[in-house]
Amino acid sequence: MKLLTSTLNIPSARIRRPHPQQLRSAQRRCQQRNSPRRGSIFPYYMVYVVLCSALMMSAGLCLHSVLKADQFDADASRSLNVLRRLERTLRRDLTTSRAAAIDAAEMSLTDKPAGETIRWILNRNIAIRRTERDGTEHSVDRFVFPHTHNLTFRRGTDADLSALVIEEYPLMTKSDRIGPSDRDTARGPKAGGDTARPGGLREITIEFSVNDRPVAEESQ
């Protein structure tokens, strides 16, 4: 038997022992899997996510408020510029012309020295100034207000006194909808599915005389 083993020269089996560091790592993993505190970090992670979401939402709301305020200021400034330009043009026409006819939606002026006919046409929130010469249209000027405005000509108590009335109706939100009867009484313009609120009406009145010079001249 010894002769056979020495002849075949079979090496003896070697057992590889794991490194002590590998043993410690394996023990540590086993302890973590069996630890009662496993998963305790998840609630802290959720709290962190909730706090980050709240901070981001607050920052978004603040930014939205700032941008909305800037948009409101820009719209108000644009409307004021249109109003000033309309009043200046209307008073200039009335200084050199006489009113031939006037109703709620249209006013015609005759400028005899220039041989022109000036027509002011009101269509809800838009005022259109047309000048005609020898039966042909010479120029067109538009004054566009926000869709919450409504423009009308109105006769005053005096026969020679009239006024251009600009009514502003605040928009209603979906939670402030009104009934059909109230909607019929609201004269404000409708646009984009929004309805004008009957209360909170604001008016801007530009008074003028139809047969003479304007009641209030612009300061030079």
Image (tube, rainbow, N blue to C red):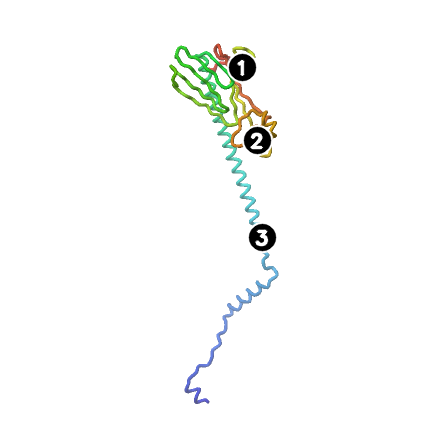
The residue identified by callout 2 is 172
Amino acid on which the number 2 mark rests in the picture: Met
Write down the residue under mark 3.
44
Eyeballing the image, is 125 above or below 8? above
Residue found at x 44% / y 20%: 129
Determine which of the numbered discs, if any, sits on residue 65 in the image. Answer: none
Give the spatial CA distance, label 3 vs label 1: 72 Å
Q: Please provide percent x and percent y for residue 180.
A: 60, 29
Residue at horizontal 51%, vertical 27%?
147
Q: Amino acid at mark 1?
A: Arg
SS at circle 1: strand
Helix, strand or loop for disc 3: helix
Q: Residues within 10 Å of mark 1 (few under 14, many from 20)?
A: some
| Callout 1 touching callout 2 (CB < 8 Å) | no
Q: Which of 131/34 is in front?
A: 131
Q: Position of residue 213 (x, y in %)?
A: 48, 11
Q: How many marks?
A: 3
Is residue 205 visible to us here? yes
70 or 198: nearer the eye? 198
> Cα distance, mark 1 to mark 2?
30 Å
Name the quarter where the C terminus is drawn.
Answer: top left
Q: Considering only vertical position in the picture, is 35 above or below 130? A: below
Q: Which residue is mark 1?
A: 155
Measure how far apart labels 3 and 2 are at the Cα level: 44 Å
Q: Residues within 10 Å of mark 3 (few under 14, many from 20)?
A: few
Is the residue marked by circle 2 packed among few (<14), some (14-19), or many (20+) residues within 10 Å? Answer: some
Whichever of callouts 3 and 2 sits on the residue coming sooner in the sequence is 3
Which residue shows up at 54% across the image and 39% down it? 61
Q: Earlier in the sequence, mark 1 or mark 2?
A: 1
Which of disc 1 and disc 3 is earlier in sequence? 3
Residue 196: image quadrant is top right
Residue 186 found in image quarter = top right
